[in-house]
């Protein structure tokens, strides 16, 4: 389980995107678990994105009575700028436990898909190939319309919550997977993602509803 603590690579890219929960899991041993002091980590080379994510999630957790601290206020540049060994990470986790942290909420980009959409897709629900002439008339734009094909990216992101109590196994409490589609503005992407995380935590009774 300790290998999971390779924290979050949160590509808090820019976005004006949609966020969709695709899967979630709750450890049955933690059905009544509620963290008291949570470390939020957004490890990315995009410092603006990291700060935005950690601050927004801290605000939402604090509004629900859960103390939370941003990792950029806890980790030293030395820790985040250099790749750490498992021994180094374990040492840091022990320090965090002694400082009163009992949980860490992490997130990671698990993959990115590039897809193509077609600007003419919307007509299909209205006409649905009822007449060939009408279908061809509307579909022929593929030959003549510049930008008919639009490429966009879908980011597959995983958020996880770990029990961080000292002398424990740093057990996984909850994990959820999300798809973030076509991100363009960082503020809205982070806001949508944080909202999705909070909803799942509430639904699993890990944090109280606001």
Image (cartoon, grey):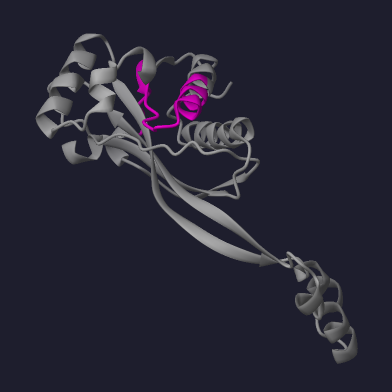
**Magenta-highlighted residues:** 31-55
On screen, residue 136 above or below 27? below
Residue 6: x and y in percent read 25, 36
Residue 108: x and y in percent read 38, 41
Residue 201: x and y in percent read 47, 33
- In the image, what residue occupies the spot 59% across and 21% down? 210
Q: How many marks?
A: 0
On screen, residue 57 above or below 176? above
Query: Would residue 32 be counted in the magenta stretch?
Result: yes
Residue 208 in view of the camera: no
- In the image, what residue occupies the spot 35% across and 20% down? 39
Q: Quadrant of residue 187?
A: top right
Position of residue 29 in the picture relative to residue 178 (left or right): left
Quadrant of image for the N terminus: top left
Q: Which residue is more in the foreground, 203 or 155?
A: 155
Q: Quadrant of residue 69?
A: top left
Q: Which residue is more in the foreground, 72 or 198?
A: 72
Query: Would residue 90 be counted in the magenta stretch?
Result: no
- In the image, what residue occupies the spot 30% across and 34% down? 7
Q: Which residue is more in the foreground, 125 or 163?
A: 125
- In the image, what residue occupies the spot 57% across and 33% down? 195
Q: Which residue is more in the foreground, 13 or 59?
A: 13
Q: Residue at the top extreme?
A: 99
Residue 154: x and y in percent read 53, 54
Residue 165 in view of the camera: yes
Q: Residue at the left extreme?
A: 87
């Amino acid at each position: 389980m300790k290998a999971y603590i390779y924290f979050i690579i949160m590509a808090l890219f820019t976005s004006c995107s949609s966020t969709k929960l695709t899967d979630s899991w709750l450890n049955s041993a933690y059905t009544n678990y509620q963290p008291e002091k949570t470390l939020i980590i957004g490890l990315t080379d995009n410092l603006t994105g990291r700060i935005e994510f950690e601050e927004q999630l801290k605000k939402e957790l604090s509004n629900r009575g859960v103390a939370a601290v941003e990792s950029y206020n806890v980790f030293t540049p030395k820790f985040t700028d250099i790749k750490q060994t498992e021994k180094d990470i374990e040492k840091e986790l022990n320090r965090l436990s002694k400082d009163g942290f009992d949980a860490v909420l992490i997130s990671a980009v698990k993959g990115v898909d590039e897809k193509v959409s077609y600007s003419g897709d919307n007509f299909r629900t209205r006409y649905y190939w009822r007449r060939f002439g009408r279908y061809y008339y509307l579909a022929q734009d593929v030959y003549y319309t510049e930008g008919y094909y639009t490429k966009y990216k879908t980011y597959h992101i995983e958020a996880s919550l770990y029990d961080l109590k000292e002398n424990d196994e740093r057990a996984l409490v909850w994990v959820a997977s999300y798809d973030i589609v076509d991100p363009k503005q960082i503020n809205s992407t982070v806001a949508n993602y944080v909202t999705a995380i909070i909803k799942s935590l509430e639904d699993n009774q890990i944090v109280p509803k606001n």
